[in-house]
Amino acid sequence: MLTQEETIKILKKTNSLLEGHFILSSGLRSEKYLQCAQLMMYPDSAEKVCKSLAEKIDNEKLDFDLVASPALGGLLVGYQVSKFLNVPNIFVERVNNEFTLRRGFDCKNKKILIIEDVITTGKSSLECSKCLQDLGAKIAGYACIVDRSNGSSKINKIISQIDFNFPVFSENDLPEHLKNIKPIKPGSRKN
């Protein structure tokens, strides 16, 4: 398994861990931002991180027979981790702004592990869960490469490769050093 230091080194090397002034999807501001899509650009690095996450999941002894991920962010992570866990993988995708299971995937009576790239509020993971539960699945747990929730997510237990607790600020309460950096909004959500 990768150590925290080894994981951070990989995230920085792949430009997945960025520093600057970022507008998060919540509207809050941060001086650090995680973009795991950058990690997934480098198959060897992504494989190391996903293999380590799979080892952590395996150590938890969860009972599941399917991995599911919300598209798009969790799709490649779920695929890689499911490969190391030797279980099938499916994904849900947004159609008219609502998660839907398509492409002939079936989850009825399956025990599912939800896998994401980054969990902050848990919103996407919980929407994914609801979609699958409505179709007859049972959720066995949640995992991600990066847990940014700091315990504030509605998800009780998250298995993660690494946890980060970056301070966030409202636009009206920025520290002086951030006021002098032009903010950018790098996230995938429009709202």
Image: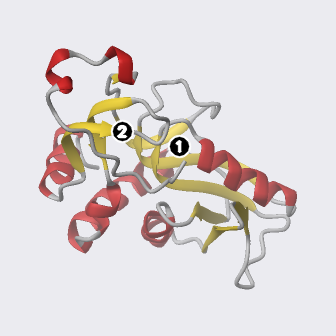
The residue wearing badge 1 is: 60
**146 or 24, which lies in front?**
24
Q: Is residue 39 left or right of residue 94?
A: left
Q: Check the image and report above or below for 33 versus 74.
A: above
Q: Which label is found at residue 23?
A: 2
Cα separation, mark 1 vs mark 2, equals 35 Å
Q: Quadrant of residue 93?
A: bottom right
**Residue in view at x 47 percent, y 42 percent:** 25
Q: Check the image and report above or below for 59 versus 36.
A: above
**Residue in view at x 17 percent, y 46 percent:** 6
User: Quick check: can you spot residue 169?
Assistant: no
Q: Amino acid at mark 2?
A: Ile
**Residue in view at x 42 percent, y 35 percent:** 148
Element at label 1: loop
Q: Is residue 75 left or right of residue 106?
A: left
In the rendering, at what x and y percent does residue 81 appear?
45, 64
Query: Which label sits in the foreground, 1 or 2?
Result: 2
Element at label 2: strand
User: Quick check: can you spot residue 117?
Assistant: yes
Q: Quadrant of residue 45?
A: bottom left
In the rendering, at what x and y percent does residue 138 appear?
79, 53
Sequence-first tag of 1 and 2:
2
Circle 2 crowding by C-alpha within 10 Å: few under 14, some 14–19, many from 20: many
Q: Check the image and report above or below for 132 versus 163.
A: below
> In this figure, which colouring scheme has been used for the structure?
secondary structure
Circle 1 crowding by C-alpha within 10 Å: few under 14, some 14–19, many from 20: few
In the rendering, at what x and y percent does residue 50 appear?
36, 60
Q: Check the image and report above or below for 124 versus 76.
A: above
